[in-house]
Amino acid sequence: MKRIDRTLLVLILPLAILMAAGPFLPQWVLFLVTLSIGKGFVVLGLMLLLRTGLVSFGQGLFYCLGAYAAGALGKVLGISDVFLLLVSGAAAAALLAYILGFLVAQYRDIFFAMLSMAFSMILYGLLVKTAALGSSDGFNVPVPTLFGAKLVEASTRYMVFAVACAATILVALGVHWYQKTTLGSLSPAIKDNELRVEYMGASVRHAIHVKFVIAAALAGLGGALTGMTVGHIDPEMAYWTTSGEFVFVTILSGTGSVVAPFLGSLIFETIRSYAYEYSPNTWQMVLGASMLLVIVFLPLGMWSIFTARRKRA
């Protein structure tokens, strides 16, 4: 109970402060934090897989699908409500993951990673060749509305930001609860020795399938939120480098808490923004150096700093 309360405080207090101060913050701050939250959802799903001993290099598939589902809903049907767009992105990704999961859940290690990346690149190839969806240029996402009401540009940015903060609390607490369930608690056991898990009567394949669907739904949610934040989507969201970026942030964050993916994503986006602004020709080198420092000094991720302090206390 104490740990749940601590998670509530760690999540709610900073987000409540940001939501209260949102109208007074610069637009670029709202944009950066909202973008970080969108990608944090994807990393949160990857954290579930990583705790099970699986690494997906194809999470861009569901990230892109969620963005295109939300964008197509607005472009074709004229639906622009922020809640419907988020739900449609998560639902489309979860549905595809449920279908693919029957195949993907049978594989482990590098085979799981490469198979997921293959599906992601298939989507990338299809989108690049589809002129109706803008081909390689993509298309613009309609300006999101709140229950059908259109807001001015500044208010729209804050509205999306506030919805993202509220979704972060709900999703993070939901994942935190899931990890305490019987199915969620199987992750470390599957990672250590899945044969023993089978002997206990649990289905490893079913557990991985469920985690795969949850991770996909979170990625689709993040893709829809990112599409609304940026206002444009393109096939690069499904490219393998995008999936590699998510794996990068997952390693940077660590798997010790549901808060870690959002913190790691915010740090990553901040470093990249400043690196690109002050060193546009070598910003990749700055990110690479950051990754190297984390691996050397914090092999368990940045959240291990807080874990170590808690143990000492």
Image (spheres, rainbow, N blue to C red):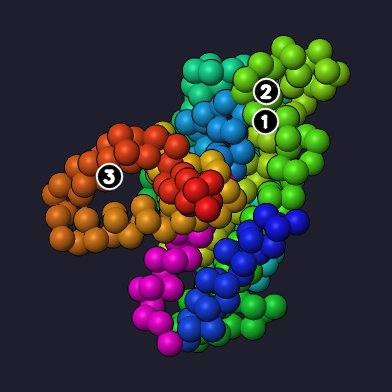
Q: Residue at x 82, y 22 (%)?
A: 202
Residue 127 numbered mark, or none? none
Magenta residues (range)? 24-44
Which residue lies most toward the right here?
201
Q: Is residue 177 left or right of residue 272?
A: right
Structural distance between the alpha carbons of marks 2 and 1? 5 Å
Amino acid carrying label 3: it is Ser
Labels 2 & 1 near each other (Cβ < 8 A): yes
Q: Which residue is mark 3?
A: 290
Q: Which residue is mark 2?
A: 190
Task: Give the x, y percent position of residue 145.
Answer: 60, 76
Task: Give the x, y percent position of residue 79.
Answer: 65, 67
Amino acid carrying label 2: it is Ile
Q: Residues within 10 Å of mark 1 (few under 14, many from 20)?
A: many
Nearer to the camera, 260 or 124: 260
Q: Which residue is mark 1?
A: 187
Task: Give the x, y percent position of residue 133.
Answer: 50, 49
Q: Residue at x 67, y 23 (%)?
A: 190
- Helix, strand or loop at label 1? It is helix
Q: Quadrant of residue 119?
A: top right
Labels 3 & 2 near each other (Cβ < 8 A): no
**N-term-proximal mark, 3 vs 2:** 2
